[in-house]
Image (cartoon, rainbow, N blue to C red):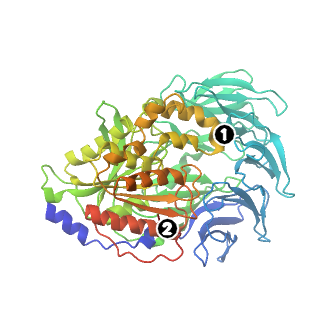
Amino acid sequence: MGMQNTAATSTVPLIPREILFGNPEKVSPQLSPDGRYLAYIAPDSKNVLQVWLRVIGQEQDYVLTADPKRGIRSYFWTYEPDKLIYAQDAEGDENYHLYLVDVVSKKTKDLTPFPGVRAQVLALEPKVPFQILAGINKADPRKHDVYRIDLNSGEAVLDTENPGNIIGWTTDGDLRVRAALAATPDGGHEIWLRESPKSDWETILVLGPDEQGGPVDFSEDGRILYFLSTLNANAERLLALDTATGAETVIVEDPEYDVSGVFVHPLTRKIQAVSFYKDKLVWKILDDSIQADFQALSHIKQGELHVSRGDLKDKVWLAAIGVDDGPVHYYLYDRVLKRETFLFSQRKALEGLLLSAMKPISLKARDGLTLHGYFTLPPGVAMPRLPSEPSARLPVVLLVHGGPWARDQWGYFPIVQWLANRGYAVLQMNYRGSTGYGKAFLNAGNREWAGKMHDDLIDGVNWMIKEGIADPARIAIMGGSYGGYATLVGLTFTPDVFACGVDIVGPSNIITLIQTIPPYWEPMKATFSRRLGVVDKDEAFMRSRSPFYFVDRIKKPLLIGQGANDPRVKQSESDQIVKEMRKNSKPVEYIVYTDEGHGFARPANRMHFYSRVEQFFAKYLGGRSEPATDIPGHSGQDR
């Protein structure tokens, strides 16, 4: 068995890091509301991601934007003809500006030219095509007020002032702010409603600190508010509130899984389908008129179906089909002819490569809680049959998701395929506190950073060992953000479990983390306090859950990657633990990227960092590695 697995791995060609971590070839297609244009994101001649444009029916595509360095990663069409908007920050500082692009003249205009201010798009509506609503923290960095921006003049006028605790706004079909999600001092939330912009806010639903939910949308006539709530249920369900009578109706629910997406008709605003993310994405169709469309799309290709609207007439949709062992494929779908047209794949270079399947798993935690996750074996390696020979056991990387109020999903992920290709089994656990599994599972993570949340990760590792997959002497832990924190916890709280660790923009001290969060996270401080602890009151407890104070326990090597401009997890979080480790003669490598924030957006930086990780893992776990090469243009500095 051991020889079979080793031989199978060694005959698989190494996939170049350029293919895995370079820019995608084409991604994020969007059809203009009038159906005339298809836009997408792709690299330009300098390998910087830009928005490209294709006139439907013509062959020639052309680059539309000219971002100088960082690359554009998000954009959307407006309802004003020939105009789209993209968001961009400065070297990872997350102070996003909104840029309006005229696709005919190619002129670009900054709609939010305010220094040090963060803007976020809130809403746009077909009935009011020449305006958008944006949240801008111009008056006070701690809160986003609603501004109405005229797309022709560029004028931004205050529409609705934030009293200080609003973290979300919902508009009706006339582009009027009608509902809001307000944070409460106990860590819970309230849904507010008003009849018109001149009316006072009314609290219509109180969601205590253990509840989840919020507004989703209004019906076409503005009378029905659709919202999510866990009240009287475990998982977030979709409900309809008649704002005139106060009557509530449950539209759809699942006992274990939260609603993850809502598919709404662009003009009638009717909710036509709802998705749940279980092991994979699952759709529930509510409108019979689209049943045949979803059925036709599901037959194109085996995989996970994601559907987005196309033109405003709802005759053409965009579909993306994802798999775990290849790129995403994008299609235009004609609803009249019930026929799809292939557009492109996300990364053609992946086609035909031997990639690995991602397997969903579930197991019992030590306290009986059911945990879900995924594991991936190197390509060509069979699942060991117990009792397995020691030589059949594999080096393993425990890859921990960030958030922590997020979750891992099934599909193609470059990091997973890279690790598998290099000979590592990969384990991804949706530990307690992860989202999507209902409020009981989410709340089970309260005050459990470095506690039961970490126990869940270790229970996953023990499962890999028990199944005969993992070599106990060759297990690494790696992750970003909370996953970086979990890495530090792994090396300090369970120092004998892991052979090494890789921390990407992870906090080392949850006290200083809370003290340095961005000002616009102020309304969420009560939620942080409930889930992590209160800095002034619980200092001893929070110290006991902070790796910074336990550096003396570290036995194994650590590699840290940090963005110098990270607004969420400041560089000081990494600086302080590196300083303490070096003072205590602990093995640490530390790389700071001077033009990055909370993660590495530029491909040169990604390839530089993962080249270093690859050599690090090869040294301490014994996996395969592509030779290290000089990466032009990276900003990484060893500190």
Q: Would you say residue 113 is visible in this rendering?
A: yes
Q: What amino acid is at disc 1?
A: Lys
572 left or right, relative to 368: right
Check the image and name the residue furthest to the front: 583
Could you say whether the residue bearing mark 2 is in a helix, strand or loop? strand
Mark 2 residue crowding within 10 angstroms, few (<14) / some (14–19) / many (20+)? few
383 left or right, relative to 312: left
The quadrant in which residue 527 appears is top right
Q: Which mark is residue 637?
A: 2
Could you say whether the residue bearing mark 1 is in a helix, strand or loop? loop
Q: What amino acid is at disc 2?
A: Gln
Q: Position of residue 206 (x, y in %)?
A: 62, 23
Q: Nearer the viewer, residue 431 or 499?
A: 499
Q: Is residue 536 above or below residue 273?
A: above
Q: Which mark is residue 270?
A: 1
Q: Residue at x 57, y 38 (%)?
A: 286
The Cα atoms of the two marked residues, 1 and 2, are separated by 52 Å
Q: Quadrant of the N terminus?
A: bottom left
Q: Position of residue 193 (x, y in %)?
A: 73, 29
Q: Would you say residue 296 is visible in this rendering?
A: no
